[in-house]
């Protein structure tokens, strides 16, 4: 039987792997197991292999109060403030989590504003959402986070919030079109819609898990946005990029334009760049022709903000000069009386 030593485990961690697969003819030294676990690497048993025991409660508490955990707690509080300052959360909405072990996660508490958290408020949970440590109760939506981690083992952190423009798209059931801005193509990609389910319910986890496998930013219909990344800030970046993109679409749909797009060939180059960064995207195997098959501006014509603007423009063009002047005078008079 092959024994993996602590030195082997340390080398494995340096390689940047997120999972360690072992079978019935291999074993891990206790120190090797702890090294992999504390690095957040999942231990995956193969056929016939006996699952390795998880950390003891005492070891988990040591992990929760370690210097590494303190850094994660402080980063979560920092990102929470940034989310609150950008109107990505309201009242006690939103939640953040970060993997710290193979089966251990630090997460935000429930019923606390993300703009006013401190490290002592954080909670420790396992992959089933069971709370292990923390004086406050963990987020009620932690099972949705666990669905993301299960669907995307490479995820290190998950951020959920209600950014106004992305949430508006989610409420409308409108998926943002592609081929318009490079940053979204490379760092986010497609932003699919997850059908509405009760927040924090097993049903919500069921629809999120398969989407998380190939998408780092997911709109939750009539709810908000959930994103994952290689760290807390990276997950937050996905949210910021997505909401800025949605905001830009709303603004662009109001402006008469030449309707420029990024060609399929150029999108393919962006996806190749994305692949080199190790980021997932369900469009990787598509040809340039397939990537440019749908005109994003045609899709935007179905967006209410675009269609209303188009209808208003058409109506104004039909007015005669005297009618237009009379309308302007009426509007100005109404504003003066307001």
Image (tube, rainbow, N blue to C red):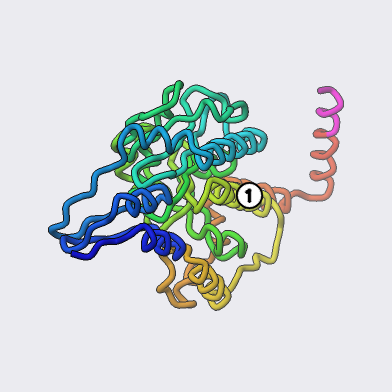
Percent position (x, y) of residue 193? 42, 48
Choose top left, top right, bottom left or bottom right for residue 143.
top left
The dominant secondary structure in magenta is: helix
Quick one: 27 or 173, which is closer to the camera? 27
Percent position (x, y) of residue 105? 41, 39
Count residues near mark 1 (Cα–Cα under 10 Å), then give few for <14, some for 14-19, many for 20+: some
Q: Give me the residue at 60% from left, 70% from top.
A: 262
Can residue 125 be seen? yes
* Quadrant that contains the C terminus: top right
Say which residue label 1 marks.
Answer: 244
Quick one: 305 or 94, which is closer to the camera? 94
Q: Give me the residue at 45% from left, 21% from top.
A: 135
Side (left or right) of 124 relative to 178: left
Q: Count all numbered tags in the image, as a single digit.
A: 1
Side (left or right) of 310 relative to 231: right
Dot 1: element = helix
Choose top left, top right, bottom left or bottom right for residue 325.
top right
Choose top left, top right, bottom left or bottom right for residue 140.
top left
Q: State the extent of the magenta-drawn residues as a range.
A: 332-338
* Quadrant that contains the N terminus: bottom left
């Amino acid at each position: 039987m092959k024994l993996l030593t602590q030195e082997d485990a340390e080398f494995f961690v340096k390689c940047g792997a997120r999972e360690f697969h072992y079978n019935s003819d291999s074993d891990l030294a206790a120190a090797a197991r702890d090294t992999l676990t504390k690095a957040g690497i999942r231990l995956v048993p193969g056929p016939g292999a006996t699952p390795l025991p998880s950390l003891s409660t005492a070891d988990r508490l040591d992990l929760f109060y370690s210097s590494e955990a303190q850094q994660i707690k402080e980063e979560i509080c920092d990102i929470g403030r940034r989310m609150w300052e950008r109107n990505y959360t309201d009242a006690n909405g939103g939640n953040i989590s970060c993997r710290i072990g193979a089966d251990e996660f630090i997460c935000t508490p429930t019923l606390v504003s993300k703009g006013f958290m401190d490290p002592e408020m954080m909670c420790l949970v396992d992959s089933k959402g069971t709370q292990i440590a923390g004086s406050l109760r963990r987020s009620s939506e932690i099972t949705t986070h666990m669905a993301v981690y299960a669907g995307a083992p490479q995820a290190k952190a998950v951020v959920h919030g209600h950014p106004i423009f992305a949430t508006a798209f989610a409420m409308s059931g409108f998926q943002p079109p592609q081929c318009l801005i490079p940053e979204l193509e490379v760092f986010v990609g497609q932003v699919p819609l997850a059908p509405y389910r009760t927040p924090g319910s097993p049903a919500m986890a069921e629809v999120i898990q398969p989407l998380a496998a190939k998408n780092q930013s997911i709109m939750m219909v009539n709810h908000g946005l959930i994103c994952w990344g290689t760290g807390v800030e990276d997950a937050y970046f996905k949210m910021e990029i997505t909401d800025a993109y949605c905001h830009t679409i709303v603004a662009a749909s109001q402006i008469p334009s030449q309707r420029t797009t990024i060609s399929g060939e150029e999108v393919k180059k962006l996806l190749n760049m994305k692949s080199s960064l190790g980021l997932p995207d369900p469009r990787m195997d598509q040809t340039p022709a397939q990537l440019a098959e749908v005109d994003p501006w045609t899709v935007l014509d179905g967006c209410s903000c675009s269609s209303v603007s188009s209808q208003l423009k058409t109506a104004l063009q039909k007015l005669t000069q005297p009618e237009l002047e009379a309308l302007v005078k009426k509007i100005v008079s109404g504003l003066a009386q307001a």
